[in-house]
Amino acid sequence: MKLPYPLAVCAAASLLESSTANHDDGCYQWNTEETFDHKDWKYCQAINDNMYMYYTPLDDTVMLGLHILDNSFGWSALGPGGNGGMKGASQIVVRKNDDDEWVAEDRYSTDYETPMIDESQDVQLLFAKQDDITGETAWAVVIPQNSCDEHDYVLEDHNMYMIYALGSSHYFSFHGSERGQFTANLIGAPPLNPSMESYDHVDLVMPNVPVTRAQEELEAGFDPSNAFVCSYFDLDVIGKDVGFDSDDKVHMVGYEPIFAEGNEQYLHHFTLFSCPMEGRDNPISMGMGSGAVQGLDDSHLYHQKVVSDCTNMPPGCENFLGGWAVGGQGVTYPHEVGIPIGEGQRWLVLQTHYYNPKRHDNVYDSSGLRVHLTTDLRPIDGGIMTFAVGAKTGQHPDLPGGLDSVAMETLYVEPDCTAVWSAPLQVLSVQHHSHYMGLHQEISVERDGRNLGSLRTEHRFDYNHQGGVDPNNAVKTLMPGDRLAATCHFDTMSISVNSTVEIGEESNKEMCLPTFLYYPRQDVQFYAYVQPEKLSKMYINDHTWCSKPASSKNEDFESQCVEQLYTDVFGFNAFFGQAIPAGYGNLAYPSFCNGGALGARLRSKVPSFCPNDGCTETQTCSEELLHAWAKGVCEFNCATIGLSLYPDLSHTKLHNTANVACPTNFFDAPTLAEPAKCEAKGQLPQNVQLSNVKVWDNSSGAGLIRNSFALFFCMMLGSFLL
């Protein structure tokens, strides 16, 4: 027999499994009044030694309960926090109102201030009680799994941050120190924290370094409040106790931060890199005209060597392995996944960013990361995908001041770029990173013309809470051919409309650098936006040369591009501007291709710039051949930046965006499809039957009246219908 909907809802709570698998120690055993009965509450999770959360996922709602054992004499709050802090959090506040009646309030916060009443009250109070003598407090509510309210979070089957707070009275005001965060899954079992005790570990910590900016950087005008210090670590040294050397492949299976006592206030982030011995191209550096990164010269290195002026990573150390930022926690990888280290990369570098705005003297630090390792390799290599929307000074235009919301240019990773992935990517966690003016950010996913939404939902970014979170269910698997779009928004109201905010690494500048942890590892893990005008200079110093006729009467030149290359190789693009020794003047194209030692050295860096038929070795390349080859170089370089070569005027305008790590660097920004309309899941009020609920009479007995009415309604409805 199929029960009518209202009765089915009433019965749902009493027909649940009574399994206590994955329940934390202490759950239920302190429940002397049997307020939270096994038959009603499927899951229990200890928040701390004095506080327990009970919850039961129903078809489209969640029953949520809080039990405080003692010393709670006022309001209490519990709810999803997008980043584990107050900014952007949603809270359920249970308290007594001015009429001494228990109420449950749906609130939200956008800053470190009193959470506001949500216009849409998506909560239903089931019961509430508090012992006036011991302070034991218990309450339960029902909330929808998706209210479609802009201030609420969708409840899905994955881990998310939760926050709690307690007040000293029922007047809703500042909570003092009675607050905190934890991780929970309100649709599934409480998260397990895998033990790292069975794994070897090494502590990569700074060797008691001063928390000050290097003198060389101060003399160069860098902000003295921000210090960037690096330390090298030799795998051949740290691997001795673990049983490996730098030629072996080892898996990093997790890590957590280590803070020197009293120094957490100065720490902004740690980033850990390995250093390939060969040179690699850094996408941002290449795009900004800095050329290829040199290979690591380790002749001067030793274990725990300190580099005090380390705003930019040392040359050759570009392989990102992991990191921590303010408000983050440790990282533990799934049992089948590890981050590879070693494999001939002997050196690790830990960069620490210190922020010392009051410029305290005589502060020394030995904080860092504890890294857990195994020589028993796991089946899958994991990786970290980085989206450098705006990370280095000069990469992105400054942000205008005096605006409550201003966005950086979006970094697009186009379908032809993700199509080279070897397999679908399983996203494990998503981390957002900006500085103090960060408002919110997202990595949107578009597949086959449909916008699947953002990898992570965070209503407001919080500089003090930058930990990673599980991805949203719809996009936890990314497919080759997906389009990704990373955007950051900022609030610049703290500075005047006549000022700007520079982009850069220091905390008093701004940054947009979201990342995600994933598997299996791909060859390309770093995408970067660079202004198209600036990036185009890596190929040709003035892109209009592609579209202009030659200024001379030499018909062999035809275009200004060929003319410029033929008459001044060093001035042709930014690469040569970085590669040539200081003090050299112009170098004509024939001298470059038929020239001596300097020409030969430069030709080895750009072998396609001269004919490849052997004439450069004998210095016998003819004028006719050189003219034809120069035209071919211009055709290629102009086409790379999306332009045709004069006299072809079919493409004369530079594209409006760029991604330096993709096969097609230059393109016009696409218009993303609109996300699907939100579909609400869970309607209130619900008729829920609970077992053995005893409500103390706290003057008005409002909680008892409301709960008793729900029980009475269910019983009467059942008798009538059956």
Image (cartoon, helix red, strand yellow):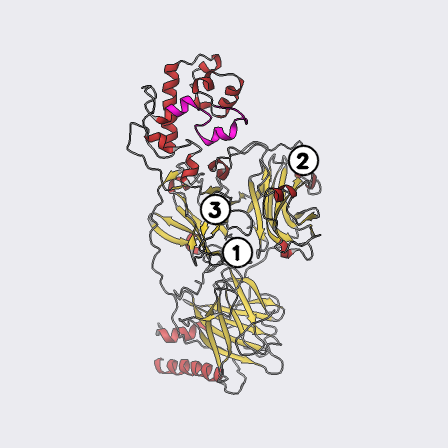
How far apart in space, not on screen, are marks 1 and 3 (Cα)?
Answer: 15 Å
Q: Read off the residue under disc 1.
A: 436
Image coordinates for residue 670, horizontal then vertical, percent: 34, 46
Q: Is residue 303 above or below residue 160?
A: above
Q: Read off the residue under disc 2.
A: 301
How far apart in space, not on screen, are marks 1 and 2 (Cα)?
Answer: 35 Å
Mark 3, mark 2: which one is toward the viewer? 3
Image coordinates for residue 91, horizontal then vertical, percent: 49, 69
* Range of residues picked out in magenta: 563-585
Indicate which disc, 1 or 3, sits on the residue closer to the N terminus: 3
How far apart in space, not on screen, are marks 3 and 2 (Cα)?
Answer: 31 Å
State which quadrant residue 661 falls in: top left
Indicate which disc, 3 or 2, sits on the residue closer to the N terminus: 2
Image coordinates for residue 608, horizontal then vertical, percent: 44, 23
Q: Is 720 included in the stretch rendered in magenta?
A: no
Q: Is residue 252 above or below residue 618?
A: below
Q: Is 582 included in the stretch rendered in magenta?
A: yes
Crowd rating for badge 1 (residues with CA inside 10 Å; few <14, some 14–19, many 20+): some
Q: Left of 431 or right of it: where is 640?
A: left
Q: Which amino acid does label 2 sit on?
A: Leu
Residues at marks 3 and 2 touching, judged by CB atoms closer than 8 Å:
no
Q: 648 or 485, which lies in front?
A: 648
Q: Read off the residue under disc 3.
A: 390
Q: Which amino acid does label 1 sit on?
A: Tyr
Q: What residue type is labelled 3?
A: Gly
